[in-house]
C-alpha cells in the first residue's frame, strides 16, 4: 500500500494501491500517476510498501516508520451528515435525488 502522510502530525491523509506508479513533476512534487494527484513534499510524505494497513485508516490513524500505526489523538467519530445540514434538510434532499433517479430509471425501461 502507498500511504500519504502529513509531515506535521503523521496523520494518514490518503492511501493508494501498491501497484500505482509514483513519478515526479517538474516542480519536484511526487505524482501518483493513476490517480493524477500530486502532493507538496514539504507537507506530505509518500511511503510505499506499507503492510497490514487498518481498515478506515484515512484521518483516523497516524503512521510512523519506527512505531507503525496508532490512532490519531485528534480523531473524533463523525456525527450527523457531512454537509452541516439539519436532518430534515438532509432527508429532503436525499428523497428528492432518489425520486429523480427513480424517474430516470423508469424512462430507460420504457
Image (cartoon, grey):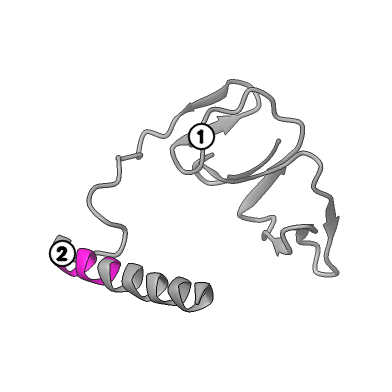
Which stretch is magenta? 88-94
Pinpoint residue 98: horizontal percent, then vertical percent: 34, 67
Tag 2–tag 1 contact (CB < 8 Å): no
| In the image: residue 29, left or right of residue 97 | right
Residue visible at 53% across and 75% down? 108
Element under disc 2: loop
What x and y, as percent, mark residue 106?
A: 44, 73
Q: What residue would you read off at disc 2?
A: 86
The x and y percentages for residue 77 are: 30, 40
For image coordinates 51% across by 31% down, the residue present is 55
Which residue is at a point 35% across and 39% down the rendered structure image? Answer: 75
Place of residue 93 in the rendered image (x, y in percent of width and height, measured from the top left): 26, 71
Decide whether the magenta segment is chiefly helix, strand or loop: helix
> What crowding class fits label 1: few (fewer than 14 Cα within 10 Å), some (14-19), or many (20 or more)?
many
Residue to which mark 1 is pinned = 62
**Left-right relation of 20 to 88:** right
Q: Relative to the observer, which residue lies in front, 72 or 107?
A: 107
Mark 2 residue crowding within 10 angstroms, few (<14) / some (14–19) / many (20+): few
Tag nearer the camera, 2 or 1: 2
- Label 2 and label 1: CA atoms lie apart by 31 Å
91 drawn magenta: yes
Which image quadrant is residue 3 in? top right
Q: Earlier in the sequence, mark 2 or mark 1?
A: 1
Amino acid at each position: 500500500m502507498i500511504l500519504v502522510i502529513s509531515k506535521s502530525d503523521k496523520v494518514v491523509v490518503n492511501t493508494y494501491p501498491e501497484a500505482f506508479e509514483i513519478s515526479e513533476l517538474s516542480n519536484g512534487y511526487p505524482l501518483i500517476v493513476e490517480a493524477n494527484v500530486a502532493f507538496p513534499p514539504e507537507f506530505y510524505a509518500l511511503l510505499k510498501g506499507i503492510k497490514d494497513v487498518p481498515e478506515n485508516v484515512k484521518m483516523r490513524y497516524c503512521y510512523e516508520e519506527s512505531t507503525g500505526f496508532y490512532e490519531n489523538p485528534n480523531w473524533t467519530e463523525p456525527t450527523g451528515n457531512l454537509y452541516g445540514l439539519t436532518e430534515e434538510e438532509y432527508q429532503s434532499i436525499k428523497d428528492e435525488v432518489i425520486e429523480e433517479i427513480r424517474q430516470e430509471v423508469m424512462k430507460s425501461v420504457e
